[in-house]
Image (spheres, coloured by chain):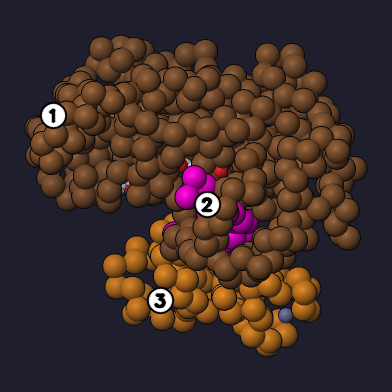
Amino acid sequence: MLLLTCPNCGIAAEETELGAGGEAHITRYGAGSADDDFETYLFMRKNARGVHFERWRHSNGCGKWFHAARCTMTLEVFGTYSAQTFEPPKDLIKKIKKKRPDWEGFVK
Amino acid sequence: MRRYSAFAIAREATRYHTGWERAWRAPEPKKEYDVIIVGGGGHGLATAFYLGKNFGITNVAIIEKGWLGGGNTGRNTTIIRSNYLQDPSAAIYEKARSLYETMSQDLNYNVMFSPRGVIMLAQTEHEIRGYKRTAHANALQGVTTEWIEPAKVKELCPIIELKGPRFPVLGGLWQARGGTARHDAVAWGYARACSDMGMDIIQKCEVTGVEQSNGQVTGVETTKGRIGCKKLGMVVAGHSSALAEMAGFRLPMESVALQALVSEPIKPVMDVVIMANTVHGYLSQSDKGEMVIGGGTDAYNNYTQRGSFHHVEETVRALNETFPMLSRLKMLRQWGGIVDVTGDRSPIIGKTPLGGCFVNCGWGTGGFKAIPGSGWAFAETLAKGEPGELAGAFGMERFIEGRFIDESVAAGVAH
Ligand SMILES: Cc1cc2nc3c(=O)[nH]c(=O)nc-3n(C[C@H](O)[C@H](O)[C@H](O)COP(=O)(O)OP(=O)(O)OC[C@H]3O[C@@H](n4cnc5c(N)ncnc54)[C@H](O)[C@@H]3O)c2cc1C
Ligand SMILES: [Zn+2]
């Protein structure tokens, strides 16, 4: 079972306590934007094999959203961080890079 | 190719079965093909088969990184039905179901198609309305289905408990001509027929790159070297995003794990297929006697071919309520497959931003039933360079146009 530590309340929560929210750091487009931007925002996904940044909600806990970095090939969790950001924290990226030297790095 | 027949069995019985041939050849890749199909699952193999059969295109290679049918094709619970809500879905799934009826004869390979009938249980008021609506839609589409009352459900499936405490059985959508087939046999039967037409089936060969020149595909990089092609068909289910990235585009898709489990074998207790979508479990009995149980998908992106344990727990809990006699069964095996789920839960068949490169994916949790229809439609797309009538609505431009084929509402869950 996946265990993620919620950065909002500090609890190490099991997967059944959490709601998965999909890919993180997606640029949002609203009414009036170009069709392909809107399509990219709503439907296009990296669906990465390997390092994946994603949104989670501590739904059966404090109720707040946060972000996690996880490997979709091994389920290894690299870390969790606040949702109030546009990109993953530098030290987390460094940590992942060390573990996965072949990783291309964070791309939007 | 020597045909399989009762006579062949008798002949081989008299000579210690020394005369059986390999079902398909295992050649080294040629330098170039007219068409390369990436992915040796049911959809890839069926596509190759119909390229040859319907369009006479046989200079074809099917490239598979593992073994034939080792992806979702060999991992699914083999439910076949065509009672979908939307017209384009009903058309392609019904085409597939009808092709399943003659597949063993067409391929000279016993795929054990068993049209034993499928009931989709209604266990909430919402489902009653939904399934009645589907039954009406199916009547207009020419797909034979029927709304049945609980007593009829009990008659068709005596081991069911109608008055479960949480989710009583309120009726069901019955498709008498749905059923199951032997999943490996579908892949093997197509492979044997393709090989016989002169196509090359190349296993244990992973595609690692897509080569292009001036916006046109020219070949693929593989673990067995470069192989050239004029046209490329990507049919790799859960790995479609990875292939698309190699070709330089993205897909409206996410990959998640869907799991299934089987019980120890028991005497025949159930000769229909039951799907219980509200409680999320589906059930049939295999010819070996095992109860074959399909579970839920994990909610997060995953490529590990196993699923979360709590889904097994939820599925088994729900099924015990509806089939109390199952509670005494031991479960033998559990496994997962990586399914490719699109934004509207319908597949993508059609062109891509790269010229000569076509994609057939997004069958998600419910594509086994579609294999022959999908192969038929995608072969046409590859041969003509344009999708035909069956595939037309499934192009990925539907996401930018907002023209969804919304089966997520109709199917609710894994289907
Ligand atoms: C547990 C479970 C239960 C299911 N139950 C049902 C059901 O009851 N009814 C139903 O209709 N459907 C069901 N499905 C869905 C069904 O299994 C799939 O939709 C269908 O099998 C997909 O077939 P495919 O040929 O597209 O993919 P696959 O069979 O997965 O084939 C894709 C192939 O591509 C290969 N590949 C991937 N990347 C590469 C590469 N880079 N190079 C070369 N080869 C590559 C893979 O190894 C794989 O063999 C279920 C699925 C699962 C997992
Ligand atoms: Zn929390």
Q: Are marks 1 and 3 on the same chain?
A: no
Q: Which residues are magenta?
A: B286-303
User: In which image quadrant can residue A106 be found?
Assistant: bottom left
Count of numbered labels shown in the rendering:
3
Q: Is mark 2 within 8 Å of ligand 1?
A: no
Q: Which chain is orange?
A: A
Q: Chain of mark 1?
A: B
Q: Considering the image in quadrants, where does the C terminus of chain B appear? A: top right
Which residue is rendered at x = 75% and y = 16% of the image? B139
- Few, some or many C-alpha atoms within 10 Å of disc 2 (few <14, some 14-19, many ≥20)? some
| Disc 1 secondary structure class | strand
Compared across the picture, whether B183 is left or right of B5 comes to right
**Extreme-front residue of the structure:** B14
Q: Amino acid at mark 3?
A: Ile
Q: Is residue B121 above or below residue B381?
A: below
Q: Visible in this render: residue B354?
A: no
Disc 1 target residue: B32
| Disc 2 secondary structure class | loop
Q: Chain of mark 3?
A: A
